Amino acid sequence: MKKRLTFALVTVALFALLAIMPVSAESNLTQEQIAAMAADRPHITIMAAGDTEYYVGETIEFSGDNTITDMTYLFITGPGLPEDGAQINNPDPAHAPLENDNPASYQQVSVKSDHTWSWKWDTTNYVLEGGIYRIHAVPRLYDKDSITPTGTALITIKKSAGSATSTTATPTLSGNEKTILPGAITIVAAGNQSYNLGDEIAFTGTNTGTWKTYLFIVGPNLKSAGSQIQRADPGNYAVRNNDATSFKSIDVDGDHTWSWKWGTAHYALDTGTYTIYAVSQPYDKENLANAAYGTVSITIGKPSGSATASTSTTIATTTATSATATQTPSAPVATTTPVVPVTAPTKSPGFGILIALIGLGAVAFIVMRR
């Protein structure tokens, strides 16, 4: 009787052992196979090329995968921008909130047949504070708070010597002064902001407040309230407040951009650092409280090319309402919405072990019978 009981216990123990044994090698999945199965799940990703820190004016390339739709939609969030997202395709995103379900407020990028996409963001003339920004890639027209697969890339924007700066005008609603439209002005000088007398200097910018941009200049031996930049001898010609004829006026295009090339040949200018003002109204330096304006500083050297660079490296002095550029630590290039993990199939005994078990049971039964 004891022998029969012993064989029965052995048989039960074998069953329990086989139940917890790992699956046979034929049904094991490698880590690469599991990753491949996860990649097949619908997803969207975004990554910034190269470094994570950029200056305003640089071109930043983004790329990623989109296995959900044939169009990727991009928008931006960050310092001074609308909380639900801003239009990354607008040079003044702080004043361009994302419009959910409106394709025009997103940067649209076509997805290739291999499910990849790429886009280059030219930040020239953009009004951006220094800090960390998050670029969002979504497969449909949803804002930041919508429930949808989303890829994001973190980048750090820093101010450079040629960065756009601006102030926003405060409307004047009383007295005899003109009402100023809300908006912002930017100005950028091409190149490294260091030139020789005789060079042609290209200025570009944006103006979201008016359809005319007015320029004047201040610097060594020029008028303190501003000199006429269009004059060959600006030191002898001051701009006159509220007199448009004394300013260099430039038409603003329909996309709120403007440009002007300043040929400095035959100009009577000393070497040193000059600041060029771009203003929404024909106001001089002493009367900018009710105008939107931007500034850029440049260095003028000798025609021989041996000019001594000025110690000034910043582009502008802005009003108290202007954002102060801050540098923040760089962040990881990209993050994506977690994908539901793929698990390996449930483990179970192999057929060979089951056959061995049946044979063992038969032997035990014969022994007990004997």
Image (spheres, grey):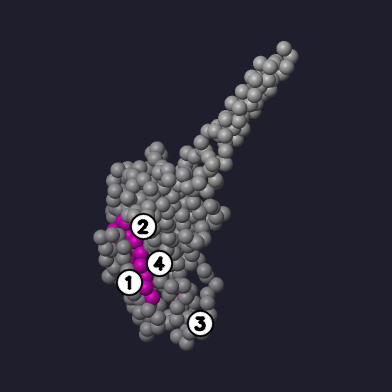
Q: Residue at x 41, y 71 (%)?
A: 190
Res 307 label = 3
In the rendered image of this protein, does residue 288 appear above or below residue 151?
Answer: below
**3D distance between C-alphas at marks 4 and 3:** 21 Å
Q: Quadrant of the N terminus?
A: top right
Q: Which of the 4 image quadrants contains residue 211?
A: bottom left
- Identify the element where label 3 is drawn: loop
- Identify the element where label 1 is drawn: strand
Res 188 label = 4
> In this image, 293 relative to 26: left or right?
left
**3D distance between C-alphas at marks 1 and 3:** 24 Å
The residue labelled by disc 2 is: 91
Mark positioned earlier in the residue sequence (2 or 3): 2
Q: Which of the 4 image quadrants contains residue 229?
A: bottom left
Q: Amino acid at mark 4?
A: Val
Category of crowding for the residue at label 4, using alpha-carbon neighbours closer than 10 angstroms: few (below 14), some (14–19), many (at least 20): many
